[in-house]
Image: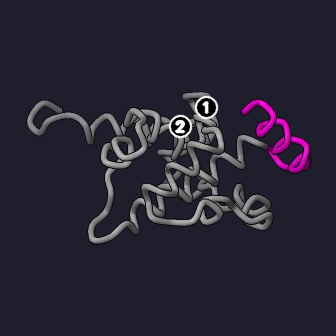
Amino acid sequence: MQYTYAIIRIVLEPFDVTKLYRVIGRQIAEARDRFRPETLSQSDLAERVGLARGSIANIERGRQHPPIETLYRIADALGVEPRQLLPSIEDLRTADSATPDISTLPEPLQEKIRTLGITDGELIQYLSDAQDRLSKTPRGTQ
């Protein structure tokens, strides 16, 4: 496993490995959403692969870097070829260009966010985490 990671680093030296796993995570989430006959939840995928739901969530966010054999198990559970989860070189080059920023928000909200002293990426991650927590909270207790 350690060799797989080392090979990825050598082959993709000009690329950020974190970006690689972020894009792989996005590909997994998209494949999960396309799963038919109905969308596959993170919990369902986790059960099929033998991981915790939190691990699937972290993989989809690019926070957890799964070994290649885990990617194969995920692909099998999703009914796709493993190569479909791997980004193209062009996807890696353009991955950050699609990252949203706060400049599209109303100015008063931008100012409030600036006072927090966090980056756009940190804000987006915080909001994503908050959304995940809220989705797990039973109705009426929010």
Image mark for residue 118:
1
Looking at the image, residue 28 sits to the left or right of residue 68; the answer is left
Looking at the image, residue 86 sits to the left or right of residue 130; the answer is right
Q: Is residue 128 above or below residue 78?
A: above
Q: Is residue 8 magenta?
A: yes
The image quarter containing residue 10 is top right
User: Do the numbered discs 2 and 1 sit on residues whose CB atoms are within 8 Å?
Assistant: yes
* Quadrant for the N terminus in the image: top right
Which kind of residue does numbered mark 1 sit on?
Ile
Which kind of residue does numbered mark 2 sit on?
Ile
Q: Is residue 88 above or below residue 43?
A: below
Looking at the image, residue 89 sits to the left or right of residue 46; the answer is right
Please provide the residue range marked out in magenta. 1-16
Q: Which secondary structure, mark 1? A: loop
- Can you identify the residue that label 2 sits on? 113
Q: Position of residue 76 (x, y in %)?
A: 48, 57
The residue at 60%/38% (across/down) is: 66
How far is mark 2 from mark 1, CA to CA?
7 Å
Image mark for residue 142:
none
* Quadrant for the C terminus in the image: top left
Q: Position of residue 73 (x, y in %)?
A: 51, 49
